[in-house]
Structure formats: C-alpha cells, structure tokens
Amino acid sequence: MEKSQAPVETTAEVSECWDESRVPTADTSKLVSVISPTHLKLSKEHHDQPVWHFPAGPGLAQEVQCLRWHFPTMSYYPSMKLTVPFEAVWRIWEDLAESTPTPLPFTKTSIDFTVMSYNILAQDLLETNQDLCIHCPPEVLNWNYRYSLLLEEIKKWGPDILCLQEVQENHYREQLHPALCQMGYTCVYKRRTGTKTDGCATCYRSSCFSEVALTQLEYFRPETELLDRHNVGIVLLLQPVVTLGSEVKKKGPPLCVANTHLLFNPSRGDIKLAQLAIMLAEIDSMIKSCKAKGKRCNIILCGDFNSVPRMALYQLIMTGQLFYRNLPAWKISGQEELSYKTKCLRLSRPLWPSSLGITDACRYTVDNKALKSQSPKPGKCQYSHDFMLRLRYCPAAYVRPQDLELLPGVTDDKPDASKENQPFDKRIIHIISHRLNLESVYKHTLPGSGNPEVTAFTSQGGNTVDYIFYSPKLGSTSYQKAGGDVASEGLKLIGVLSLLSEEALWSMNGLPNHIFPSDHLSLVAKFQLDILE
Ligand code: KL2
C-alpha cells in the first residue's frame, strides 16, 4: 500500500541547504538542513524556538549557517502543515580525535573510514504494523518520500561501509542497489528466509575496500527446533585498498564487517542468543582464517539487535561472558518488562543443542572452513562443555601415561581426595562466552543531560536497540609489550554522530518524520586504522 501524496495545507515554509559533494575525509564540510517555520528566526540565542539545524558532517565540528533553499523532495508536498512546533534538535558530529594528532609509533601510516548502520524500516513491515506509526502524518510514511530522505542521509554522512537492515527486496533491486552502485558502492544483499520481504544489505565503497570472503547467514535451521525464526546476517571480510598517486595497493590488516537484524520477539531471548552465537562463531571463523594466513583482523559488528543496553545479550557481546542459569528469557533483550507474565520461560542448559555445531564459547565445534577446503590436516577440534563433562568422572581420564614422570600431587593417577566431595561448580556449566574483544561506539547516555540515547522509536516510546561494536585499539603499553605486529591491531574511534533523547524525538513528532525517514536513527562512526608503510 503506497500512501497518498495529496497536498496538505501549510503554515510553515520548509527550506534546506544542501552541499551535493560527499564528505570523504575529515576536513570536508557537509550538509546543513533546516526546517524553519517562517515566524521564527534562525538564531542560536533562541533555543526554545522551533529551528532545525544540522552541523557539519564527519570531521567538521562547527555548525554551518545556511541559506534558504527549497527542500527538493518537498516539491511533491507543496504545502505542509507543521501542527506540532519543532524544537531545536540537532544531531551533532563529534570529533573524538585529539586536535594535534600524536605521531604514530614505528613507521606507520593510517587510514580513516566511516561506518553507518541503519534500519531503514521496510515498507511492508510498516504497513503490517501500522499501530507503531499512529503518531505520524501520512506523508512521512510514503515510500518514495522516505526513499529520497534515506538517500540524502547516506550522501550526507558518506559512509565507506554501509550496513542496512529492513531492506525490502524489490526496493533494493529497483531503487537502492542501482543508486548505491552509482555512488561507488559494491553491495551484498541477503533477504530473510520465510515469507517476509526484507533483509540486510552491506555495502562498501569499492575504492576503499576489496572483498576477501563473504558468508550469508541464515539463522533458520530446520534441524534445530529452537532456531525456527527467519532472521539473517552478512559477514564480509574486506581488505583495505590504498591509493598512493596512481598506485593502488592493498594495505593493512583485513576488516571483518558483520551486519545483522536479530529476532524482534521480546519474550524469546533464548532464540536471540542462539542467533547471536551463530554470528559470533562465523566472525571467529573469519578471524581464524586470517590467522592461518598470518594476518590479524579487525571487527565491526553492527545492526539491529532488538536488545537494549546492559541486558544479557548486550553483556555477552561487551564482556565476552554470560552466566545465564535460570534467567528469564525476556531479560536477555530487556525490550519490555515481562515479569508479570505467569508463564515465564527461563534459560537452562544447554542453550542450543550440540548438533548446531557451536560450542559454549560461540565457536564452531569443527572449523567449517577447514571442512570446506577438505584439508587433509583438519584444524584442532573444539569440544563443548557437555562433552568435556562426560569425561569428568571417566576413569580413563585419570590414567597417567606411562612415560609421564610421577610428581606427587601433580601427575598422580588419582584425583585429589580433598576435592572429591566439593560441590560441583554450577557456574562453569551455565556460562556462554566469546573471545572477540568488542567495544560499543555509543555509550547509551547523552552527554550533559545523561538521558538515554534513542536509536529506535515507536508510538510506545524510544529505545536503544541498534549498535556499532568494534575491536578497539590496544592501549599503547600493551602493544609495546606485545611487540611490533600487534601495534597495528585494533580500531581507533575518532568520530561519532550523536543520537537524540526520547524527549527531543517527541518534540519533532517522533519517528519517522520530515527529517528522519525511518523509525530508527542512523548510527555513524569514524575509525582510524594503522597500516604498515
Ligand atoms: O523492533 V524492529 O521492528 O528492530 O524496528 O524489528 C522488528 C519490529 C521488525 C522485523 O520483524 O518488524 C517489527 N510489534 C512491533 N513491531 C514488530 C512486530 C510486533 N508484533 N513484529 C515485527 N515488528
């Protein structure tokens, strides 16, 4: 169902100032867009006045004054009534790099790149869940209107890597893909399994990266009862490409870019965790394949995780560990407080069957890449806790090999009698973990007010459910200790596009609106990566 494009009355003039050029580096200026009802002035002194103002793009900290100019897409809607007054609400680009860059150690240079993660709200989902947008004037729900704003958002921040969720297949094939190709991107699209018409798309600027490996993940596993939902993910291994004069070189460590949209259902955290475990195992496998070639690999893991900060799924990603025994399944994502429900699903072990081929450490039991290449020497096997525990009381496990020297208390062939009756440590067998060192770009509260950051908004309110996680650069002391090759490991976060509070979003009539075309905001971060000279 396409919404009508009927003109509406207006009391406000809509204007915009647009710099057509993209912002590829830290020093270029970007778009400024302003919605300014005519009776109000563009003035910083009038904070309570309904003024819209974007400051600069990546790398430009100061705001840019702009001239009145006609909003191109508004020509379809010649007269627009702004019934709710807009307040001054800005998304500000924050430069995190020091003003005087510290000289890099050894003989390194670095490259900067920008990542955007954005759930663009599939039109089919919008139309089947119309209750989520009851606060919206109909014209902001029109696909063609939203599409032109989406393209503007992408051009405005000029990401080198673009991870989209809720990309409807026909819109991708007919509109987004051709447009992104023209803008210099190479794109990978993965539609959800099942009947829903949307999926994820990962695009990268062809002049900045080349593809090394690709895995399209389907979390639906017909042989695993738990995994009966149709969510997907994309894992891309990219090699940075550096152009020096006329010379194009592949330089620096590879970058693993993972993009996903996890299950929405707030009460099924058990399924979300298993979906995440598949994603983490795939990233781990990509890293392992790099290691086999003697290369270290950086990680970007982003998307819509349908989970809020500091709850269990988030904790697993950020700390690398989760103790889940008896945890109510709704607490995995924490989107809604569901403790009032009489039937409350609680987690018990194992979280997923060993037949899934993924250990409690979120790694493949047998490396699938080793299997795929049918290597005569398969990689070391990983065993699940379940399997190891079966060995625990097995007498054969206590037999000392004949050639092993007998050291009393160390290589005895009997278990330590004093420890025999100790209670079995239940914590160990109720922990899942991963080995990726991940940090979140966003800190989930806004500087100053301390209000929660909002990435997604419905008529029920706002939440953070979208993230950009990355493998951070090690501290200088640790990499100096570890030696030369480790110095290039890790990404340095050098810029971020600020999010907004729920209050600020309500003041502009929630999401989507005439500025932001989705029920999610885009997440944008800029990273610096050391490369060897
Ligand atoms: O929360 V989302 O929106 O990340 O923005 O992910 C899902 C929801 C998306 C894909 O399944 O569709 C939305 N109530 C509210 N939103 C829903 C529902 C629902 N019952 N089902 C799907 N979505």
Image (spheres, rainbow, N blue to C red):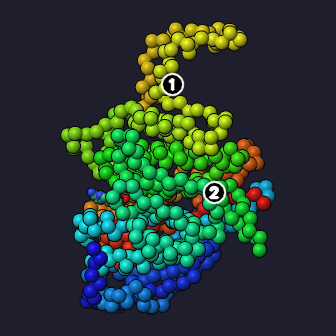
Indicate which label's residue lies in the foreground, 1 or 2: 2
Name above or below for residue 254 compared with residue 71.
above
Which corner quadrant of the image does residue 207 belong to?
bottom right
The image quadrant where one finds the C terminus is bottom right
Name the one closer to the observer, 69 or 20. 20
Estimate how packed mark 1 is, as few (under 14), some (14 to 19) or many (20 or more) residues with alpha carbons within 10 Å: few
Name above or below for residue 360 compared with residue 442.
above
> Which residue is rendered at x = 63% and y = 36% of the image?
379
Residue 347: mark in rendering: none
Look at label 2 and name its amino acid: Val
For the residues bearing labels 1 and 2, Cβ distance under 8 angstroms: no
> Which residue is rendered at x = 42% and y = 25% of the image?
426
Camera sees residue 204: yes
Q: Residues under labels 1 and 2: Cα distance?
A: 35 Å
Camera sees residue 466: no
The residue singled out by tag 2 in the image is: 212
Label 2: state its secondary structure.
strand
Estimate how packed mark 2 is, as few (under 14), some (14 to 19) or many (20 or more) residues with alpha carbons within 10 Å: few
The residue singled out by tag 1 in the image is: 388
Q: In this view, does 239 lie to the left or right of 523?
A: right
Look at label 1 and name its amino acid: Met
Label 1: state its secondary structure.
helix
The image quadrant where one finds the N terminus is bottom left
Name above or below for residue 290 compared with residue 68.
above
> Which residue is rendered at x = 51% and y = 19% of the image?
391
